[in-house]
Amino acid sequence: MAALTQVFGRLLKAVLTLLAIAVLNFFLVHAAPGDPAVVLAGEAGAADEQMIAQLRARFGLDQPFHVQLWTYVSNVLTLDLGYSFRQGAPVLDLILDRLPATLLLTLSAFVISLTFGIALGVAASARVGKVSDSILTTFALLFYATPLYWAALMAVLVFSVQLGWLPGFGYETVGADYSGLARVLDILKHLILPAATLGLFFMAVYMRMTRASMLEVSQMDFVRTAKAKGLSGPVIRRRHILRNAILPVVTLAGLQAGQLIGGAVLTETVFAWPGIGRLMFESLAARDYNTILGVFLVSAAMVIFFNILTDVIYRLVDPRIGART
Amino acid sequence: MIRRFSKHKGAMIGVLILAIVVALAVFAPLLYPRGPWAMVQRPFLQPMAMEGFLLGTDTLGRDVAAGLVHGARVSLLVGLVSTLVALLIGVPLGALAGFYGAWVDEGAMRFTEFFQTIPNFALAIVLVAILEPSLTSITLAIAIVSWPPVARLVRAEVMAVKSREYVDAARLSGLSNRRILIEQVLPNTVSPIIVLASLMVATAILLESSLSFLGLGDPNIMSWGYMIGAARTVIRSAWWLSFFPGVAIVLTVLALNLIGEGLNDALNPHLSRKGHA
Amino acid sequence: MNYLKATTFLIAAALAGTALAAETGGRLDIVVQPEPPGLMLGLVQNGPTQLVAGDIYESLLRYNTDLEPQPSLAKSWTISDDGLVYTFTLQDGVKWHDGTAFSADDVVFSADVFLRETHARLRSSLKYVDSITAPDAQTVVFTLNEPFGPFISIFETGTMPIVPKHIYEGTDYANNPANATPIGTGPFKFSAWEKGSYIHLVKNEDYYLDGLPKLDEVFYRVIPDAAARAVAFETGEVDVLPGGSVENWDVPRLTAMEGVCSTGKGWEFFAPHAWMWLNNREGPTADKRFRQAVMYAMDREFVRDVVWNGFGKVPTGPVSSKTNFYTDDVNIYEHDPAKAKALLDEMGYNGEPVRLLPLPYGETWQRWAEAVRQNLSEVGIKIEIDATDVAGWNEKTAQWDYDMAFTYLYQYGDPALGVSRTYVASNIAKGSPWNNVQGYVNEGLDAKWDAAAVMADPSARADAYVDIQKTIVDDVPVAWLLELEFPTIYRCDVQDLVTTAIGINDGLRDAWLEK
Amino acid sequence: MSPVLEITDLSIALPAGADRPLAVSDMTLTLNAGEILCVVGESGSGKSMTANALMGLLPGGVTVGGGTALFHGQDVLQLPETARQQLRGSRIAMIFQEPMTALNPLMRIGDQIAEVFAAHNKFTPAERRQKALDLIQEVGLPDPKKIIRAYPFQLSGGQRQRAMIAMALALEPEVLIADEPTTALDVTTQAQILQLILDLRSRRGMAVMFITHDFGVVAEIADQVIVMRQGQVVERGAAAVVLTHPQHDYTKRLLAAIPSGALPDAREIAPVPVLELRNLNKVFRTGGGLFRTAREVRAVDNISLSVARGEVLGLVGESGSGKSTLGRSVVRLVTPDSGQVLVDGVDLAALTEEELRHQRDKVQMVFQDPYASLNPRHRILRALIDGPIAMGKSKSDATTRAHELLEIVGLGAEAASRFPHEFSGGQRQRIGIARALAMEPDLIVADEAVSALDVSIQAQVLDLLRDLRARMGLSILFITHDLRVAAQLCDRIAVMQTGQLVEIGPVQQVFLTPQHPYTKQLLAAVPGADWQQAHDLRSGT
């Protein structure tokens, strides 16, 4: 029962947050200079008053601002994200079209960065003060300081253009009509570079954090207890230090989900990855209001999803949380 | 403390690199008085192909070295100012939330969480697009997306310091809440804030370069991100155009991180984790 | 005249006959940038839409690279001697992609009903049209109220796409669900559109010209990043880079690759002409001497050679050298900073900052603006570049909120279609970035433009346009920068790719792959 | 009796830059089977280092400098790490001071016990579980089936320490090293744990090396005693001998510094109340939210009492009894839910924030933690004058008074210009007292003011308080968990248990003829109570 009301509370909070985001972004996006009618008319290579008026009426831009806002918010409440006049399709469809690609990219980057980050952090902490530790931490620092897009460009240059090992852009081989396993492998091949470059920065973050956390936890009393019990070093690290050291890393990872999704805009641009980050960036230039707002909402929902996910992981690892609340 | 910092090898390397960058930025007008935009030689001059053009020229025949040196000013300026603005937003908010607790805390933290729920780079893009790219709008956008961690850190620190007995003692001395917060609590949260700020400057430089890379930079000002963004299309034929600014960013950000780490070790020997949150 | 056209058709048919010997089959991957907002050409006529939809929809005519009309949906046509009646005879056995038979009624519906409502540019030409009728299923007659000189040039796919009456009549055009699966008469049929990734077209097996098209399928690939597009071409993922899809700096490298060909042809109809709007209403740019100083201050050859890799031609005035009625008998503005300074001194320019709005179409245009700023600042003009995106650019130019603004416009083969719109005072109206945005008013010239448009005699028209060009070049209402040339880059085994004045926008009908 | 462990000339080196080169030098001791050896000393004496060196648990940078430690004739200090690992937990086990942090918070108790078997490859998993259950039973934890599945946070401090002991006993070690295992516990719990260790010793016959700072504990359990000071053994011998006839000055001083159980003579105090509490209540609610039900703790439950002018009232209770909340309510750091806090006739509980600020000089507080009670960034002078100035004193008057007070508390006026980190814990506590006095309060609340100090420092601060009480006629509400300390200073004693006042009366009455069963229980649990009385009789106080 307590758990149920808690889930309910959590969801209610999420919905309220999303609504607030919808309203804020509505204001933001509409504050931008230029409107979609002018852009669309402009791209057609000619525009007169009649055409622009037609377009504005079609987009509902001739309505007073508060009416537009009310219409939007009440639509959002029924999960209707509106219609993209520019793309000629409901925004939800557009986003659902692109969402799997973004989810695949961000989730793999998340998993890659977390797994490798923690593994390398543990490895470094076990060799603290040795040369291998210095090498690992130096690399982590370098990755941490390297702009994401720059790493992406370099990766394409090296692995795609020079070595030809991996495709440098796109989601799958177009027109190859693979199915089943072949298609999965094809997508995986395309995924490696974007996911790796997106994950690289965060891997560095998690690695540094894991290392610091491991070192901190290893100073704790219960680790001394474990030693006093006669446990071997590796067992202590695995069973006692790691599980405790991971908690702050998981918390941080949850907090950084927003950054990860934001970073996807850059990655998707460089790798021509058909995700929602790119959709947003393109819609922004076209002032495709509904689409921008939709992407914002969906990505905020993703952040909340990542937050909840890390929360669940946290609960699995830390028995104290569930009992306390 | 200074002794502990100066013993930190990484931090000293960081200070050295940063000192060079700052010196170049400060003396840029003396080193390259014609400015970064002057088209001074034929385009696509390879590095070291001609005397006086150590780093080559770009697509329009502008000196890459001049661009780097002038760009350092922008990167540092944006990094510093946006961090300051973020601190101006985050410190009071976090301090009030942590100090007064109850609904103030609830409200401030909901607000902060709200900002953390919007993917920050996407928000920065929209903000810059709305305000139109300029030095001010970019700085502001970076500040707006980077204050939440400050607020959270300050809140946590204030809450920790608030429960110290000397704060109780100050209360018993009849000091007002405002004085207690400003004189007793905040000064004791400064160390982790300094550490976080040094890392934020680094992050802001990265953010600025990312925005410029996407074409959302101030076109009147030469910055490293702009240089990479502009050179991206010729990366195959003129690697040096994006390579050198990239190295400049990596080195500067690295230096700031090293300094942050050194400060962290020197200021908060027991809080080595907090700076990254 | 009738005889002449028929001959042309025979030649075209003969050409088609030889083409039969060429190999059929194969697939072509072409870059499209940016992703089109829709493929219904009657509703959207921007570049990317026309690139893709030009294979799906057709118009009555197409134009060779000398801008001479060629058969398309019309197999022959006659023009009455007074230049008022245009009669088109349609091809036999044309079917819409859904199998419905095509007829003259579709043409009448398209031109008179559908496009009148949706197509702003065509609308301005249709005002010369008195009536459009279909005496029989094979014949369409356009009757004009004045002898509008360039009328024969308006039957290009993007200007007058023929849309299916049976699908659109009586519907809300913009929201017709069929817009997502466009139905045309063209050589390729719409198959699939993976948003953000590719658009897939397949061969129209029922195409009315025997043996055409030769290709089995076409993929239009959406790759948003210019560098990634270059890589895609290098790695062989795409076969054709339409003009403007890679940055100019990549062009020499790509064309130098083995087995890669390029052509500057295929832009004759559009003749993209680049200039800077100079706000004639206020600020320093309102002064003619300032505008002339800008012309003298700019090193346009440098930009052509460095920014555009030598592609393009420095223009002499408002009319492109590719467009009909061009003359170079005007004042030529050389790069002459001293002269520019003198003019500025004469007007007493006080160093007031001038805003410059670049065209947000990528790095080339950004560099161009930077080069111009450098040129102008060297003669003492203080420039601030305004940064904005496409929407902001549209807004600022349409609302006249600029001092100097980059742009380029198509000329559509005739000054009356693509040039006069920029300079006549009647075309001053806020809200559009395609009219007389700079606010140039010269009433004497306005009358000359109007008269020249409806002269039946071509040589009289030519004289009128020379006169107009001389005056305008002296006034410098806008600062002409470059006649743009966008090279199309493709693998040499792709044959007959660029055959008309709009290039690959309707070129895939004849294209084939050498094996 | 055969020696199980013989340490000879052990020295432990500290890293460069420490306050002394050797943590322990030339330590020699013998531990016999079935014997409890107490190693006694104040903080920094090196007593824990010795234990850690034996177990191979020395912190980074600290190394064994020399000497041998023969365990059954084998020098454990020379053994390779794997061999020591095998020794640890199976033949030599150790328990620690902080039961709250010494257990892995993320692991079930049963698993943590069973892990000992796993580490030494003993038994099958099912057997391990059974053994764990037996051990839990043996150390007296209730409901073993439930405990085995519990996480540490679900157990109280005493229960955790029992669980620790269960782990230590798992493989029936010959030596148990206990490093201050009861210091963090309440007296009644401490008494139980000590009893448990005594029982186990006699049942299993193992040797115990018990490290403590508390001579009371020594008196309870020790067979042999070693007294350490700054890394050196200053005295050793049978417990009975050392306690009754200490030879070394240091031991003597330590024993003298122990608050004697002897009760001071009753003083005449006029019953003019300076503080009156009437029906005070404070309830803490935790975890309340929109969708959660709050948990309630009645920290102060309808308490009424008064403190007379010039009187010292001792408020005694175990952790969680609500005594600190009561103290904080008196100074209005906590606002009570209901009831009155009358100081000099003014009800502090009813004042608004603003009114309260101007009445802050009425009651002052001396805090527990000498390291947290002074702002590290402010000079001492500032701590002493901020309050008086806020109360309207001129800066020069306040400064003069601050210098006087620093003299009074025995630090000297020049202390004013220094920073807190330049002072020791005891000195800081004196500054804290001076700060309270600077406000010229009617009442001082001393919240565990000497609990964090070593016993010798504690004695000095108590002397100071006693002196001030005499010189200035201070009224003090003295909050402590330590009955012995309370007995030394207080005129009356109030005993609290779970938020309620269970007994209040003159100190003689409460100590000699306690009425409430809880008071009796508390008194009985004071370690070394029997010995203490004997000691007091002998020393003739």
Image (spheres, coloured by chain):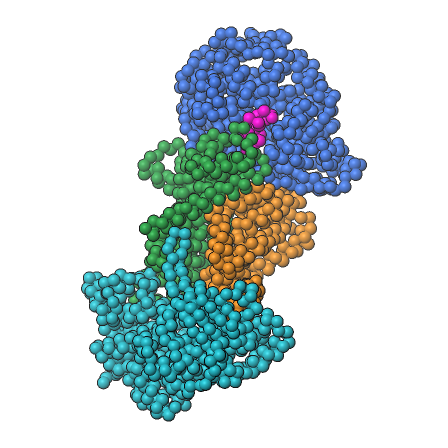
Question: Would residue A192 be found to the left or right of residue D76 on screen?
Answer: right
Query: Which sits in the foreground, D212 or A245?
Result: D212
Instruction: Label the cyan chain with its letter.
Output: D
Q: Quadrant of residue A134?
A: bottom left
- What residue lies at 19% left-to-right and 62% top-to-bottom? D126
Rendered shade, chain A:
green
Most common secondary structure along the magenta stretch: helix
Q: Quadrant of residue D129?
A: bottom left
Query: Which sits in the foreground, A54 or D71?
Result: A54
Rendered shade, chain C:
blue
Question: Would residue A18 be found to the left or right of residue C243 on screen?
Answer: left
- What residue lies at 46% left-to-right and 80% top-to-bottom? D271
Question: Would residue C248 be found to the left or right of residue D163 on screen?
Answer: right
Residue D27 lies, in percent from the top left, at 36, 83
Residue D108 lies, in percent from the top left, at 29, 62
Q: Quadrant of residue D517?
A: bottom left
Q: Which residues are magenta?
A: A36-56
Residue C119 lies, in percent from the top left, at 55, 22
From this view, report whether residue B185 is shown above or below residue A203.
below
Q: Does residue D145 show up?
A: yes
- What residue lies at 79% left-to-right and 38% top-to-bottom? C348
From this view, report whether residue D410 is shown above or below residue D182.
below
Question: Would residue D526 be found to the left or right of residue A71 on screen?
Answer: left
Residue A18 lies, in percent from the top left, at 45, 44
Instruction: Label the orange chain with its letter.
Output: B
Query: Which sits in the foreground, D276 or C506?
Result: D276
